[in-house]
Image (cartoon, grey):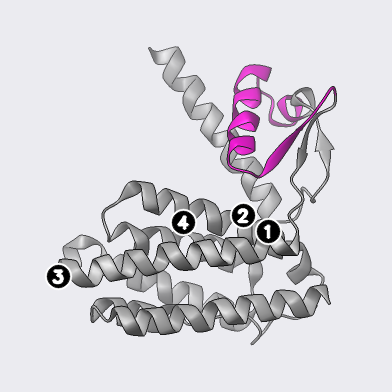
Amino acid sequence: MSTAVTRSTLRQQIADALRDEVLAGRLAPGQEFTVKEIAEQYGVSATPVREALVDLSAQGLLDSAQHRGFKVHEYSVADYHGMVEARALVAEAIFRGIAERGIIRPEDGFLSVRRRAEESARAATSGDLNVLIGYDLRFWRELSALFGNAYLTDFLHRLRVQAWVFAVPLLRAAGPLEGRLWSGHTELVDAVGRRDAAGAREIITAYNKHSLDLVDKLVG
């Protein structure tokens, strides 16, 4: 039992570390590597590494390269548009559900979400991509968790990770990002706190348009 738990924890740690490498742009789209290379990099056995890579492949972040190991998945602009559309539909369902379920109390985690929103907004305004990605992912995970459906929370989180993976190389090549990134996190939290589903939908619509316009401009 202890060995199994340790291996499972190590598997998750490796998966998290590699996901962060992809989000940071240190593992570029299309970059190939083997189980052996990753195992040597982290000083661990091949088994938890292989399991972690399979997990990341299931999440759409890696592809299995036959006879060569794995490579970072390369998303297209069309993929990104699909991600944005999907996350908009999920977010709308979540916010509508929160509005219908009643008042959000501090003990529901709302104060923590508010802090995450403020941290994310500051990072976005200053254009600090490294800080923003981590805060933004935690913000959306905690915000969506207020709805109380872990399946929707996990699905939205996966979509957001994939969207960041696509956008990161473009954003890092775009030069200074100060004032160019969406920073409406606190406004969205305020709308959710008021149980204002229509207001939240309006903010999300503007956010998604901003995301698509920025990416299309950088690609174009």
Depth check: 83 or 193 in front?
Answer: 83
Kind of residue at disc 3: Gly
Q: CA distance from mark 3 to mark 2?
A: 32 Å
Disc 4 or 1, which lies upstream in sequence?
1
Could you tell me the amino acid type at mark 4? Leu
Q: Secondary structure at mark 3?
A: loop
Tell me the magenta residue range. Answer: 38-67
Tell me the quadrant of the picture where the N terminus can be found: top left
Distance (Cα) linking label 3 and label 4: 22 Å
Q: CA distance from mark 1 to mark 3?
A: 35 Å
**Cα separation between marks 4 and 1:** 15 Å
Q: Is residue 78 above or below residue 117?
A: above
Give the quarter of the image for residue 214. Answer: bottom right
Front in this rendered view, residue 109 or 2: 109
Q: Which residue is mark 3?
A: 102
Res. 174 in view: no
The earlier-in-sequence mark between 3 and 2 is 3
Which is more N-terminal, label 3 or label 1?
1
Q: Nearer the viewer, mark 1 or mark 3?
A: 1
Q: Which mark is residue 156?
A: 4
Query: Which residue lies under the disc numbered 2?
Result: 162
Q: Residue at x 79, y 76 (%)?
A: 218
Residue that badge 1 annotates: 79
Asked whether, in this view, residue 15 is left or right of residue 195, the answer is right
The first of marks 1 and 2 along the sequence is 1
Camera-side residue: 30 or 213? Answer: 213
